[in-house]
């Protein structure tokens, strides 16, 4: 094999094209992976649409798109010691430098010199991809390929769920896209009492219910703050996770958060948000944390434990499995809000879906 199919962002305009390109060679410390399943993320939508964020973030074209994947190690670069040919791996997309203050202090996932797989390097919407050994996370054999491809975003959801200290708590999740839904199933697995989900799409709310939500609220139809306050005897929720990036919804969250509550922010707002710090944060003693990905690799360990014991409801989150060739359909389904998580299959060898 010398060439491969890949979805390439070739020009600074909307779209991408499926091309035959050379199979990449793993350099020192890197591995070549046969991509068995790959998933479309919101970031890929930005790059595909070539919006303002993508124009600032992607500095070099052409670029192979895609960053969420699972696959099999095919070839080892020089000096790779901890992986073997045939290992099943999932991609961690935050590539750390290993030398900065953060990397030396257990915060590799927010490395000061972080390189982002598929933004600063070629990605995985292809038959093969190359990734540094440290970012090829070996996964257990019983994790289906399509779920392996979802581990990167799922890890972000799990991390958010852990940070709000869910056991026995009443937690609100804003936004029932793949990240919010991952948080819902993680909260359930980690023992949250009430899991209240708000989203303007009734379809997504119904998926949230399958993923473990106990209460569904549609802000287009009801007063979320009033309902939550009523539900919690006027106290408010113990915590909320924002996976929407909606300025309006985040501001509202601080109104129904109880005193001493916790907030995990995952969704990226497109504009600056203003908070009345006195009543909404200081007098409340609200604890706010931003979530930028998974801890390397504590979150992965927890995720694997939960998955290995069947504690996460991932089936409802996967809406489509499409051949890589149908990428246009995938992007338009997502754009029209008609899909949840879309898995792309580069091979069509009948290995997907591999879940039972
Ligand atoms: Zn670093």
Image (cartoon, rainbow, N blue to C red):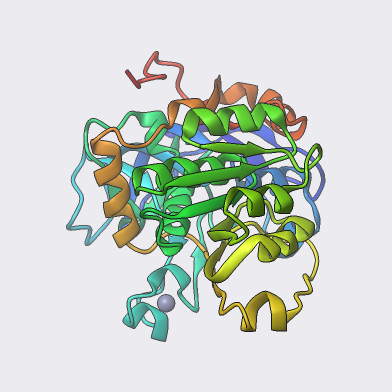
In the rendered view, tell whether residue 250 sits above or below residue 97.
above
Residue at 57 percent across and 38 percent down: it is 215
Q: Nearer the viewer, residue 301 or 103?
A: 301
Evaluate whether residue 75 shows in this view.
Answer: no
Q: Nearer the viewer, residue 325 or 45?
A: 45
Residue at 35 percent across and 43 percent down: it is 189
120 displayed left or right of 201: left
Percent x, y of residue 123 = 52, 47
Residue at 22 percent across and 39 percent down: it is 140
The N terminus: image quadrant? top left
In the rendered view, tell whether residue 181 sits above or below residue 47.
above
Q: Residue furthest front?
A: 233
Q: How many marks?
A: 0
Q: Residue furthest top?
A: 350
The C terminus: image quadrant? top left
Q: Residue 178 falls in which quadrant of the image? A: top right
Percent x, y of residue 69 = 44, 40
Percent x, y of residue 60 = 67, 59
Q: Residue 337 falls in which quadrant of the image? A: top right
In the rendered view, tell whether residue 281 sits above or below residue 153.
below
Q: Quadrant of ligand 1?
A: bottom left
Residue at 79 percent across and 58 percent down: it is 248
Q: Residue 41 falls in which quadrant of the image? A: top right
Percent x, y of residue 182 = 48, 43
Evaluate whether residue 5 shows in this view.
Answer: yes
């Amino acid at each position: 094999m010398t060439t491969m199919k890949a979805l390439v962002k070739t020009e600074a305009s909307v779209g991408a094209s499926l091309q035959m390109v050379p199979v990449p060679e793993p350099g020192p410390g890197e591995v070549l992976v046969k991509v068995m399943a790959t998933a479309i993320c919101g970031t890929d939508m930005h790059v595909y649409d070539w919006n303002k964020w993508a124009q600032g973030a992607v500095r070099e074209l052409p670029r192979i798109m895609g960053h969420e994947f699972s696959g099999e190690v095919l070839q080892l670069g020089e000096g790779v010691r901890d992986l073997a040919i045939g290992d099943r791996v999932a991609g961690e997309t935050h590539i750390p430098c290993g030398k900065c203050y953060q990397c030396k202090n257990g915060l590799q996932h927010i490395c000061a010199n972080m390189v982002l797989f598929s933004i600063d390097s070629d990605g995985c919407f292809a038959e093969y991809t190359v990734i540094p050994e440290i970012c090829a996370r070996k996964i257990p054999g019983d994790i289906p390929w399509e779920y392996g491809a979802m581990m990167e975003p799922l890890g972000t959801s799990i991390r958010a769920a852990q940070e709000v200290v869910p056991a026995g708590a009443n937690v609100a999740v804003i936004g029932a896209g793949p990240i919010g839904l991952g948080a819902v199933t993680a909260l359930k697995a980690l023992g949250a009492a009430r899991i209240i989900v708000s989203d303007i799409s009734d379809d997504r709310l119904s998926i949230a219910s399958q993923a473990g939500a106990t209460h569904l609220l549609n802000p287009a139809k009801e007063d979320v703050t009033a309902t939550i306050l009523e539900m919690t005897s006027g106290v408010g929720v113990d915590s909320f996770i924002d996976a929407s990036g909606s300025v309006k919804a985040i501001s509202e969250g601080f109104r129904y958060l109880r005193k001493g509550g916790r907030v995990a922010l995952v969704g990226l707002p497109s504009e600056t948000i203003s908070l009345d710090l006195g009543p909404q944060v200081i007098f409340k003693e609200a604890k706010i944390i931003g979530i930028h990905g998974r801890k390397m690799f504590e979150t992965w360990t927890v995720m694997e434990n939960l998955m290995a014991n069947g504690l996460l409801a991932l089936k409802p989150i996967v809406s489509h499995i499409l051949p890589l060739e149908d990428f246009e359909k995938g992007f338009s389904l997502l754009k029209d809000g008609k899909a949840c998580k879309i898995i792309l299959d580069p091979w069509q060898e009948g290995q997907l879906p591999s879940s039972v």
